[in-house]
Structure formats: structure tokens, C-alpha cells
């Protein structure tokens, strides 16, 4: 993959990131950082060295969990658009792809017939990376954008995941890379296409906090992504920004030193928006409890402190809610709790 353009990347950060080689640009750094990091905590350098050329960081908003970083990477949106366009008009290829992963499906199209769910189409590329897709089928989709998209996924993972983990380790005060040895990742393409069951609905992606360690969100220039700065107050993210958001696993592993931003995507009638998200999660067998020897700065549930919850179980609980919100799975007790409510109960007790 050739990388020619600079993208703005927003990720969790603070003044401490300077010691990871990341240049702080925003004046609001310190006021924001105190919301994320225990000011008393002594940062512990992670065991792996920071890369020589680290991305530059600036702030997205005064007190949310996001800052912006310059990255030499950009998602191939023409290829992503071509892939979605091909699949929207070749339902036989959609059926073939989904048959390779019958458990969940590769392409989610619930928005075509469910007006209440998130009004978007998604393609999950992790089954393709795991070689579940027969070579011939994969190759037949390469000219329609798949090849380019997978190349980008692999390049970004190799180039930026260790850098971001390294920076987050400083915020966490402990080496998070020990919980990320297997590169447990998913790469998801999203098409907020106006052509769904509810064309006028503004609900592109319902409010949620990602469950993993962090997610990198690439956008095609179209706005719609919003962060919850304080409860009920939503701040729009510029449509041309690339964003790193931390998730629940980062909150737990860092003993509460890292927080996680709730976010959502709003649709404008008739406007198509594409995004590509790289989700990074701890290894499935990792016990979700604060790592390292430092005292957690928040009070976690007994289940968390005992280390009774592993990543695979957490993913299972969260995944059911996630698929319900996206319209891809039914739930018996769906009305009683939201995705975040259920996770909050597990994490805080
Ligand atoms: O499409 C976006 O910008 C964000 C999507 C998202 O938050 C998610 O898939 O978890
Ligand atoms: Fe998300």
C-alpha cells in the first residue's frame, strides 16, 4: 500500500504522551488530561520502545476522551464505495459471502427491512482475514475493492497498533501490550446509505461505547459521528478526521486511568456516509481486571477485581446487545437495558 496523504487521527492522550515521542498540539491538553489520568499516578514506560516517528496529537474537545493525531494513513474510500456498490447490486455475492460465515454473516443488511435499527450496512472483514473465505470468492471480489481494503487493513495494523498501544500504556501506567499478543482485531466497513427501510431516520449508529481496547475510525469526509462530552451533550466530530476512541477493555485494564467515549452516528436525509473502523481488542483469554501493581483509581465490581471475566465472555455479552441494536439479532429482554447499561453493571457492580 502506498501512503501519500496525512489523515487527522483523534485518540486518547495527554501531556504524558510527549514522553512517547508524540507531539502535543492542543492548548486544552492539560484540562482534558486530568479527566483521563490520575494526576498522582506515576507513568510507567511500556517495555517496547516508542517508534522513532510518532504521530502528532491535538485535542478534539475540552473534556472528552479524544485528541487528534496526524497519521500517514488514509482509508481507500473509492475502493470501499466500489465494494459496497458491487455488493448492493450483486446479492448472489452477498449470499455467497454470508454462507462462508453462517454464524454471524459477513455483510449485515438488516437496515433494508428494519426501520427501528441502525440504518447502515456493514462488512466485517475479520472472517476474511481468518481465511474463512474461499480463495476463489475472495479473488472474484478483489477487482471490486476488496483487495485494496484488505491490504490497507494489514498495513495499518502493523504500522499503528503498536504505536497506539504504547501511548495508551503510558496513560494506563502499565504495559498493555502484554494483553495484546495475538492481534485480536476486526476491520469493519460501514455504509450509511440513504437507501434503507427508514430513509428519513437520523439513526445511523445508536449511542454506545466500544468494548475493546481502542478503535480507529476512518471517515470519508462526511460528518455524522458525534461524541458524548457530558451526559446528553453530543459534540460533532469533523467529517475529515480520523479518530481513535478507547473502549471498555482499556478502562478496565488501566484501572480506570483511561476513560472511554460514548459515541453515535447521525444520518442526514439523502446523504451517504462511509467509514472504516479498526477494532483492537485484548486476547480472548485475557482476564479483564486492572493490570499491573498500581491501585485502580475507580471502584470496579467484585467480578472484575477477582478476574472472573475473560475477554471472550465479555465480547459475547456485549455482542448480543450490539447485534440487537444493529438489527441483526432478536433479544428477549431487550427493552430493560441498553448495551452500555448492561456492561456498566458488570464493570462497576
Ligand atoms: O461509522 C462510524 O463513524 C462509527 C461506527 C462505530 O462507532 C462502530 O461501528 O462502533
Ligand atoms: Fe463505535
Image (tube, rainbow, N blue to C red):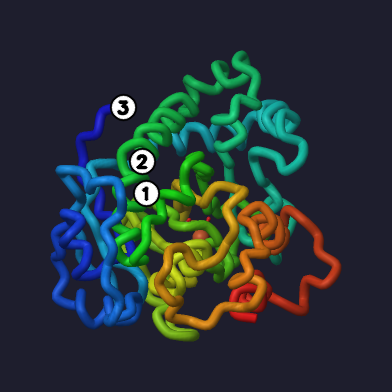
Q: Residue furthest right?
A: 332
Residue at image position (70%, 63%) is 321
Q: Are marks 1 and 2 in contact (CB under 8 Å)?
A: yes
Residue at image position (21%, 67%) is 16
Q: Which residue is the site of mark 3? A: 1
Q: Which residue is the site of mark 1? A: 220
Who comes first in sequence, dot 3 or dot 2?
A: 3
Give how far across and how far down residue 148 sits, in percent: 41, 27
Give how far across and how far down residue 156 sits, in percent: 35, 39
Q: Residues within 10 Å of mark 3 (few under 14, many from 20)?
A: some
Residue 265 visible: no
Residue 11, quarter of the rendered image: bottom left
Task: State the residue in front, 269 or 111.
Answer: 111
Camera-near label (1 vs 2) is 2
Q: Residues within 10 Å of mark 1 (few under 14, many from 20)?
A: many
Quarter that holds the C terminus: bottom right
- Element at label 1: loop
Residue at image position (53%, 82%) is 299
Q: Image height check: is 214 above or below 7? A: below
Q: Which residue is the site of mark 2? A: 75
Give how far across and how far down residue 167 sits, in percent: 29, 57
Amino acid at each position: 500500500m502506498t501512503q501519500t496523504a496525512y489523515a487527522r487521527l483523534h485518540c486518547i492522550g495527554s501531556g504524558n504522551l510527549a514522553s512517547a515521542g508524540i507531539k502535543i498540539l492542543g492548548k486544552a491538553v492539560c484540562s482534558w488530561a486530568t479527566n483521563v489520568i490520575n494526576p498522582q499516578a506515576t507513568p510507567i514506560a511500556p517495555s517496547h520502545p516508542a517508534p522513532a516517528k510518532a504521530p502528532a496529537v491535538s485535542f478534539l474537545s475540552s473534556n472528552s476522551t479524544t485528541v487528534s493525531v496526524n497519521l500517514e494513513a488514509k482509508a481507500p474510500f473509492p475502493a470501499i464505495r466500489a465494494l459496497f456498490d458491487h455488493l448492493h447490486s450483486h446479492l448472489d455475492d452477498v449470499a455467497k459471502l454470508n454462507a462462508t460465515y453462517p454464524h454471524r454473516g459477513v455483510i449485515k443488511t438488516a437496515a433494508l427491512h428494519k426501520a427501528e435499527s441502525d440504518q447502515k450496512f456493514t462488512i466485517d472483514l475479520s472472517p476474511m482475514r481468518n481465511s474463512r473465505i474461499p480463495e476463489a470468492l475472495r479473488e472474484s471480489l478483489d477487482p471490486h475493492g476488496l483487495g485494496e481494503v484488505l491490504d490497507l487493513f494489514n498495513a495499518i495494523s502493523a504500522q499503528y497498533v503498536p504505536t497506539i498501544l504504547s501511548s495508551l500504556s503510558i496513560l494506563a501506567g502499565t504495559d498493555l501490550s502484554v494483553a495484546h499478543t495475538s492481534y485480536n482485531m476486526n476491520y469493519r466497513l460501514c455504509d450509511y446509505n440513504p437507501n434503507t427501510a427508514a430513509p428519513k431516520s437520523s439513526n445511523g449508529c445508536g449511542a454506545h461505547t466500544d468494548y475493546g481496547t481502542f478503535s480507529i475510525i476512518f471517515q470519508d469526509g462526511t460528518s455524522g459521528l458525534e461524541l458524548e462530552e457530558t451526559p446528553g451533550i453530543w459534540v460533532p466530530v469533523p467529517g475529515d478526521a480520523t479518530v481513535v476512541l478507547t473502549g471498555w477493555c482499556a478502562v478496565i485494564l488501566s484501572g480506570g486511568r483511561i476513560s472511554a467515549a460514548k459515541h453515535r452516528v447521525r444520518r442526514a436525509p439523502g446523504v451517504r456516509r462511509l467509514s472504516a473502523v479498526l477494532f483492537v481488542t485484548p486476547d480472548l483469554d485475557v482476564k479483564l481486571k486492572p493490570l499491573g501493581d498500581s491501585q485502580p483509581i475507580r471502584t470496579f465490581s467484585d467480578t472484575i477485581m477477582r478476574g472472573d471475566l475473560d475477554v471472550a465472555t465479555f465480547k459475547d455479552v456485549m455482542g448480543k446487545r450490539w447485534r440487537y441494536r444493529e438489527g441483526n439479532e432478536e433479544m428477549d429482554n431487550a427493552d430493560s437495558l441498553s448495551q452500555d447499561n448492561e456492561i456498566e453493571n458488570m464493570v462497576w457492580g
